[in-house]
Amino acid sequence: MQSDALSGVLLPLALAFIMFSLGLGLGVDDFRRILRQPKALLVGAVCHFVLLPLVAYLLIRATGLTGAFAVGFMIVAACPTGSTSNLLTYVARGDVALAVSFTAVASVLTIFTLPVILSWALQELAGTTRSIEVPIGSIMAHTFLMLGVPVALGMLFRHRAPARAMAFEARATRIATGLFVLIVVGAVVKNWRLLVDGFAVLAPVALTLNVAMLLIGFGAAWAARLPQRQAITLGIESSVQNATLALVMASAVLKEDAMAVPGAVYGVLMYAGGLAFAFGMRRFTGTQLPQPGQASSATT
């Protein structure tokens, strides 16, 4: 009963509050700003919605993962950027405005992309030849309710009562961070035996995926000649996932606790790579890296 209450009630409510707290920091201008930066948006979207699932799938095949753990990593890859990416971007001295805007846009787009990727992953990686009924409509409805509605309510509160929203935002962020920690701890405790048995296999995959996407996001932005601060941002946005949503989708929507374990592992370990990247970039933010072609032209 306690397990059902955690998966079916507490996890979705906690996630809803986390997304509501994100909405408190957003306004219509944030979406207008990202539309005025189509190049950064396009590069970020390709990295997050195309390359991230592709890299996750290649890692799954390369390591031989199958079944619930394989699907669990695809759930992680299909989730939107985590709201804590904004904090890491701030630490790294990246473009925080771009981070906030991209996080919001990614959360909205995920309402449509997550069901498609998840449906394919269940068919491709579930380790069974039988026909699998994938509740695409239910998944899309759950995703919209857990992401779209809370963010919209947070934005509405900010629009209707900006002073109160700004005053509550800092407290809401602290509460959301605490809820995220509780969700991860709850998932770890609930799946402790699976975690212990699978950590040696899951941790290297999680760290490799995280570091690979940090470098791919940063490298793609650099190759596209985006400013260094935006390159830092897209590296973080491509790798820091909404692990809370991954836990909710696995435990509360699909009712498969084992699929939540990769999300719990990634949700913890992504901060190791993320913080190392953030503090490393923080040291070099003042030194603009040469864009592609600049080094060769300087020597001719």
Image (cartoon, grey):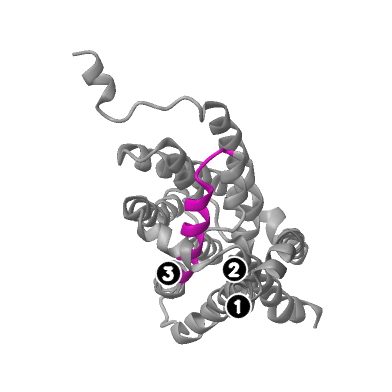
Which quadrant, please, contains the C terminus?
Answer: top left
Q: Which residue is mark 3?
A: 109
Residue 291 located left or right of residue 156: left
Which quadrant, please, contains the N terminus?
Answer: bottom right
Residue 228 in the image: above or below residue 41: above
What secondary structure is found at the residue carrying circle 3? helix
Q: Nearer the viewer, residue 179 or 4?
A: 179
Q: Which residue is mark 2?
A: 23
Q: Quadrant of residue 242?
A: bottom right
Q: Are marks 2 and 1 in contact (CB under 8 Å)?
A: yes
Residue 167 image position (x, y, % from top left): 74, 63
Q: Quadrant of residue 178?
A: bottom right
Span highlighted in magenta in the image = 92-110
Residue 82 located left or right of residue 108: right
Other residues around mark 2 within 10 Å, as few (<14) / some (14–19) / many (≥20): many
Residue 197 in the image: above or below residue 293: below
Tell me the residue at 45%/86% (across/down): 137
Residue 250 image position (x, y, % from top left): 59, 72
Residue 154 located left or right of residue 231: right
Q: Amino acid at mark 2?
A: Gly
Q: Amino acid at mark 1?
A: Leu
Q: Which residue is mark 1?
A: 153
**Upstream in sequence: badge 2 or badge 1:** 2
